[in-house]
Image (cartoon, grey):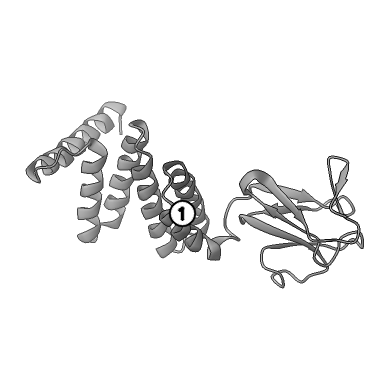
Amino acid sequence: MSVRARSTKREKTLERALDLAKRAGSGASEGDALESLASLEEKAGNIDKALEFYALALKQYAASGEVYASARILERLADEASEQGRKADAAKRYRESLDYYTISGDWLSIKRVKRLLEPLSDWAPAWGYLLDIMSGLRHPMRSDSVSVCRDSPEGAIRNNVSFSSTFVSRRHLNINREGLHVDDLRSLNGTTINGKLFNI
């Protein structure tokens, strides 16, 4: 499809969306109109078409700086990906919507999206890595709070990263993504960050 044909198709879609919004008597933006079209397509069972309209609405909202609306659309796209079993895509979209909700200050939505993200933590993109200098293994940090411990079977401690070194305690430290806050859990050897030892 040529660039001109795509442009014409997009213009017709926007005209249809704005026409529907005018008939409804609202002073809707292009993003609102496209979101309404997506909702209509979804109710009609045309999921692929609905997702296409949601993606167009997201572009319009992002271009016009409508942060909350962008977050809402990203969450809707994440819901759809989750329902279709596309866990990695769902985790990515939920994380993006969480960032937008944080900017908008909608704490109820932040709490809801964090609950939706919990079962997808294994599919979320890593926001950082811990390096085991003894083995050379990199451990991805995917959840907002990561527990670091020694010789714990994966999953025995929620969101843990397990090291085999005797220098790491069974419950050594927690790392929180927000503000990169590190809490030593009264480990025997303490925690060193950038060569400085703290919390012995």
Q: Is residue 179 left or right of residue 42?
A: right
Residue at (79% x, 63% y) in the render: 149
Vertical order, 64 against 170 (above or below): above
Residue at (79% x, 70% y) in the render: 152
Front-most of residues 41 and 33: 33
What amino acid is found at the position of numbered circle 1 in the picture?
Answer: Ile
Front-most of residues 30 and 113: 113
Kindly identify which residue carries mark 1: 110
Front-most of residues 4 and 31: 31
Q: Is residue 60 left or right of residue 175?
A: left
Residue 23 spot, x, y in % from top left: 7, 43
Residue 30 spot, x, y in % from top left: 23, 36
Residue at (33% x, 37% y) in the render: 61
Residue 196 spot, x, y in % from top left: 87, 42
Q: State which quadrant residue 172 falls in.
A: bottom right
Q: Residue furthest top?
A: 4
Number of numbered discs visible in the structure rendering: 1
Q: Is residue 21 left or right of residue 154?
A: left
Residue 189 spot, x, y in % from top left: 91, 57
Q: State which quadrant residue 171 falls in.
A: bottom right
Vertical order, 121 against 151 (above or below): above
